[in-house]
Image (cartoon, rainbow, N blue to C red):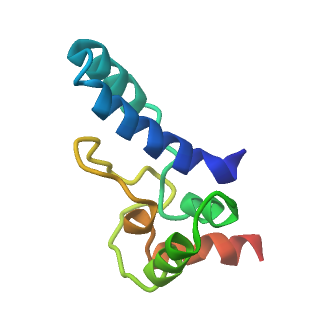
Amino acid sequence: MAANAALNDTVLVEELRNFRTIDKNIADVGLKILSRHLWYISDILLGFSFFDNRHDEKTFIQMSGALKKPKETINEFRETKLNIEEKISLPSLISKNTMKFFEIMG
């Protein structure tokens, strides 16, 4: 489901980073491969995440607040540059541009 994709993949990135304590080589290869498949995590497409009912109330509030955050992008439909070496939170990826998702969907 599109609504679940961003959370699924951000959790997987975190799990692979933690797996480095068990097998660094496998974890690094997994992260490298996964990083090529995060193309859909963009300002606009992150709007789907608002329909993922696995978020707690605090996360929904943070995501809603982030809709006011300005962000400069060249093309909102292309991926958001993720640093897979840092903790990734969906609210930190959402911006004012995410509102375009709701405009498009009517």
Instruction: Check the picture and name the quadrant holding the N terminus.
Output: top right
Q: Quadrant of residue 71?
A: bottom left
Residue lying at 43% horizontally and 74% vertically, measured from the top left: 95
Q: Quadrant of residue 22?
A: top left
Residue lying at 30% horizontally and 21% vertically, measured from the top left: 27
Q: Position of residue 20 (x, y in %)?
A: 24, 24
Residue lying at 26% horizontally and 22% vertically, measured from the top left: 28
Residue lying at 47% horizontally and 62% vertically, measured from the top left: 76
Q: Is residue 65 left or right of residue 14?
A: right
Judged from this view, the residue extending furthest toward the right is: 106
Residue 38 visible to the viewer: no
Instruction: Check the picture and name the quadrant holding the C terminus.
Output: bottom right
Q: Is residue 1 left or right of residue 20?
A: right
Is residue 66 positioned above or below 19 on the image? below
Q: Position of residue 86 (x, y in %)?
A: 24, 49
Q: Position of residue 5 (x, y in %)?
A: 60, 45
Q: Nearer the viewer, residue 36 or 93?
A: 93
Residue 78 visible to the viewer: yes
Is residue 90 positioned above or below 17 on the image? below
Q: Is residue 47 left or right of residue 95?
A: right
Q: Quadrant of residue 55?
A: bottom right
- State how many labels appear: 0
